Amino acid sequence: MAGPKDLDPSSSPRALLGAELRHAREKAGLSQEELGGRLFVSGSFIGQLEAGTRRMQSEYARMLDEVLGMEDFFTRNCRAAAKSRYPEHFAEAVEAEASATAIRHYHSTLIPGLLQTADYARAVFRAYRPTAPDEMIDELVAARLARAHILDSPTKPLLWAVIDEAALRRETGGAVVMAQAIRHVADLARRRAIVQVLPFNAGAHAAMEGALKLMDFEGAPSLVYFDCVGSGRLEDDPATVAHHRFTYELLTASALSPEKSLALIEELAQDYQHDEQP
């Protein structure tokens, strides 16, 4: 009897892997919790793999092949699903972002990636990698802009960004770049996203230790992504996600209202515009 065929990498390999995993699990008569127990992970983690909101890592692929009697099916096809234009620590978060129904993002030092312009992103990447060749920077910028295509839909995902005032006042790439970048944020705030500014006079707040991103999904548990220099971590523990959701709610309570935030953003855009003049 012929075994399962390789998956087509061009046809959403994570979703196809998830569908094959669900089929194999049900054929084996295992619940998500039972299969998770054999892999020493939670049932919700198995559910996320099946829903395509989590990337299947090679070590889990090998264990799934063994537990479900799939020879090397998941191991082989996991390699196709793992190909990404993003750094390894960030790739899984980007893939989850693409299937999220809601994204809530706070950043203290820069405009969040989904809201960046090309020139602003280029200035950020150049600061990260001052000796990198231009071709590498161009690839990084293109990958960042590609992420923003999830906003092409007028309704999904819900994007709610809280941006620290410091990020808007840090002149990244010069006045011309900042004026364009902030006008772009204002445009998204008017037509597509909920944007709040956390002002300096808010004082100490719940997320002073770093950036925070929460992602919700249809039919799968929520995730929180922690971002730091050169690395990041995706977490699905319900208690951890609930704690940081509360943190985000505290941030929105401390931030300016969307209307006052838009007024401040437009004022800052004008300030940078004036700086552009000779």
Image: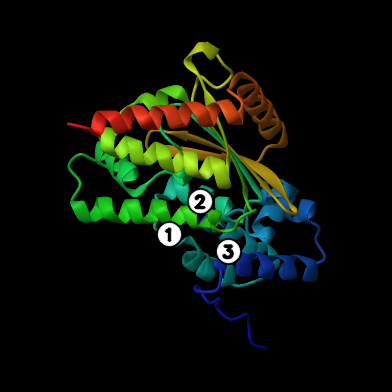
In the visual, does 131 lie left or right of 266? Answer: left
Query: How many marks on residues?
Result: 3
Mark 2 to mark 3: distance in Å? 13 Å
Q: CA distance from mark 2 to mark 1?
A: 10 Å
The amino acid marked with disc number 3 is Arg
* Residue at which label 2 appears: 94
Q: Check disc 1 and report the residue beneath it.
A: 84
Q: From where the camera sits, is residue 65 visible? A: no
The x and y percentages for residue 71 are 60, 72
* Secondary element at tag 3: helix
Q: Earlier in the sequence, mark 1 or mark 3?
A: 3
- Which quadrant: the C terminus? top left
Alpha carbon distance from label 1 to label 3: 12 Å
Q: Secondary structure at mark 1?
A: loop
**Depicted 55 relative to depicted 251: above or below:** below
Q: Residues within 10 Å of mark 2 (few under 14, many from 20)?
A: some
Vertical placement of residue 172 versus 46, above or below: above
Which residue is depicted at the point 72% across and 36% down? 238
Between 255 and 78, the one lying in front of the other is 255
Residue occupying the point 56% across, 16% down: 205
Location of residue 72 (image quadrant): bottom right
* Outermost residue to the bottom: 1
Q: Is residue 254 left or right of residue 9?
A: right
Q: In front of the other: label 2 or label 1?
A: 2
Closer to the eye: label 2 or 3:
2
